[in-house]
Image (tube, coloured by chain):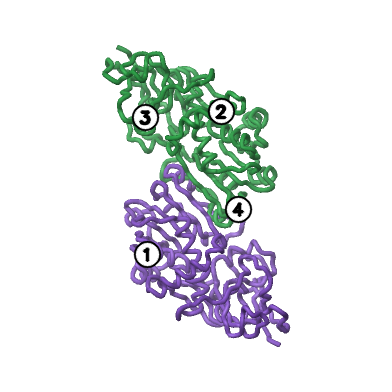
Chain colours: A purple, B green
């Protein structure tokens, strides 16, 4: 018998998630049945959508998230002992999973890709859901052309930092907004952003006017809110906005959506297109994206920085820290 | 010598346009040169974009707008005396025009289409720029499918009233928001909208929840502002928004764009696409649109109601009345 612990969300969050919204539940895992595997978690992801999806999931629920684990026991030929898998089983230290169930998008599992020596944790970061989000969300929705000017908000986050680098690979001029001077330094000095700004201390309107005198062609929006209105108002004709998230609003209660300057005047006069997406749109191209991302990482074209917290007991703090913007790069927790 | 009068905009408007922002200038028109025609204005259009484009045009400028006139003299074989033309010469009673100049979009002129007995004024309304805007803007940007639910704001206006009717022709369920009970009656009783609401007196959120229990698939946005946020928050996955205008913001000064609940949370979670357009996008399909619109009008499928003001001296009042929503259908002025 294996004793397993998991985080259960008891309530809908009010504002920022509180530790008391969670309960750690201990269970004894049952013996495996045909098709099942026993997995020991090694890496767990904390991402903004864990906050955003809280309202979409009837509580109580097990805290989902992407994670990497190693198979300890197996009654599935496809998933042998010793192999690692990527699953969406979230914040738990051990779990049993039935590999024969036809999964919904989030419940898909797959063997850890060939990481070519890169840490397995990258399979839930730059070569996992955030990487796929950046890769297809930017390339398919923004459809950037060489020489165009691209703006990214949440630029030092898991997705934003990849979008900016992919834009550089594609020959674009890249401007990022992030939440600290240290992040700005990292974006400019390490990741090759042409320009980055601390949105907390600059006048975003003026900063962007100066940094993008010819206007903005593509905007990858992770945050929503007034800064997005400011950026969208500086876009060129036929500009494209990919809306990936709106982290600035995630800790507001529904029905209390923040207000910002309306987008319609710019959308009409510049004939802009603003498209939202969720990454499941590209489920059938997932492997293609993962392969490209790992290749770029190996080639040194893509830096996959991680912000690592250690320990099952600290996963909640890692989550709230990420929501507060304490991470630079992908926030993951090592169990 | 012909004495001609025209309205000249002296200033950038502050808030609502004022009569004192205009000056009526009288000139003597010169004798015609090769390629020129002398036109007597018969119908003049007043439209929201006359307000919106004020900031884009260095003042003073002649007040442009679409108009229909009859050719009194001609030194152009293509434009003979007695024919009518559609031009963008705006609020003037007579003008001389050089037909040999290669025109920009707005300066295009063309002979009045075969109106099949319909008033020539419809060539600057339901079978002119507003009609083309509704026809291509709705069909090409919203890409409605039979059975889908379509919402239109500014529904009793020149463009909105056509969009709703075209949506009905295409087999959609149509819900309109307009600014008076009389307009609501007209939309439901005369134009066949499935449901219409007076946005000034209803709770738009609740009204729409009830009228569109299965959610909204297409939204044709003429107004911007909070009502658009409310509608967009009730859209279905992969919903499409065509942004045609934002009349709610036109009388605000730039830099003072109104605020409304942000759109990004709905745009992401429902994977919406919001696209702005200007009608010049379909310049090369203009004739195709005009022909279809005139056909529908003749067949009785499309009602092209006009709100007619008479007299050169009253064109300013007609314009401000339209901005205030006093018109039902297309606001035109008969000279």
Marks 1 and 2 close (CB-CB < 8 Å)? no
Same chain letter for marks 1 and 3: no
Same chain letter for marks 3 and 2: yes
**Residue shown at the point (37%, 16%) measured from the top left:** B80
Residue A326 visible within the image? no
Q: Which residue is mark 1?
A: A169
Q: Which residue is mark 2?
A: B329
Say what secondary structure mark 3 lies in.
loop
Q: Which residue is mark 4?
A: B237
C-alpha gap between disc 4 and disc 1: 32 Å
- Percent x, y for residue B174? 64, 38
Mark 4 neighbour density, 10 Å: few (under 14) some (14–19) many (20 or more): some
Mark 4 or 2 closer to N-term?
A: 4
Looking at the figure, which quarter contains the N terminus of chain B? top left
Q: Is residue A218 left or right of residue B118?
A: left
Residue A135, above or below A235: below
Q: Nearer the viewer, residue B142 or A286?
A: A286
Q: Chain of mark 2?
A: B
Q: Nearer the viewer, residue A184 or B85?
A: B85
Say what secondary structure mark 1 lies in.
helix
Mark 3 or 2 closer to N-term?
A: 3
C-alpha gap between disc 4 and disc 2: 32 Å
Mark 2 neighbour density, 10 Å: few (under 14) some (14–19) many (20 or more): many
Q: Which residue is mark 3?
A: B107
């Amino acid at each position: 018998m294996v004793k397993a612990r998991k985080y259960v969300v008891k309530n809908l969050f009010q504002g920022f998630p509180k530790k008391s919204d969670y309960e750690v539940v201990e269970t004894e895992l049952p013996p495996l049945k045909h098709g099942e595997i026993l997995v020991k978690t090694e890496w767990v992801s904390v991402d903004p959508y864990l906050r955003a999806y809280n309202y979409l999931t009837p509580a109580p629920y097990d805290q989902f998230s992407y994670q990497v684990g190693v198979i300890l026991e197996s009654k599935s030929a496809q998933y042998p002992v010793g192999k690692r898998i990527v699953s969406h089983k979230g914040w738990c230290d051990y779990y049993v999973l039935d590999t024969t169930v036809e999964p919904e998008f989030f419940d898909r599992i797959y063997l850890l890709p060939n990481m070519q020596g890169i840490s397995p944790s990258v399979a839930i970061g730059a070569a996992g859901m955030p990487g796929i989000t950046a890769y297809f969300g930017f390339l398919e929705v923004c459809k950037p052309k060489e020489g165009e000017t691209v703006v990214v908000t949440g630029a030092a986050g898991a997705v934003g930092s990849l979008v900016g680098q992919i834009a550089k690979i594609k020959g674009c001029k890249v401007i990022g907004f992030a939440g600290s001077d240290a992040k700005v330094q990292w974006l400019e000095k390490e990741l090759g952003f042409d320009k980055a700004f601390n949105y907390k201390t600059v006048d975003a309107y003026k900063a962007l006017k100066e940094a993008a005198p010819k206007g903005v062609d593509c905007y990858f929006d992770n945050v929503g809110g007034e800064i997005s209105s400011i950026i969208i108002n500086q876009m060129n004709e036929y500009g494209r906005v990919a809306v990936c998230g709106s982290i600035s609003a995630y800790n507001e209660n529904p029905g209390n959506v923040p207000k910002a300057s309306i987008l319609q005047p710019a959308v009409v006069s510049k004939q802009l297109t603003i498209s939202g997406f969720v990454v499941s749109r590209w489920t059938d191209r997932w492997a293609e994206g993962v392969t490209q991302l790992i290749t770029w990482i190996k080639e040194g074209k893509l830096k996959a920085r991680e912000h690592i917290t250690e320990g099952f007991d600290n996963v909640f703090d890692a989550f709230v820290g990420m929501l507060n913007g304490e991470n630079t790069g992908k926030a993951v927790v090592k169990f």
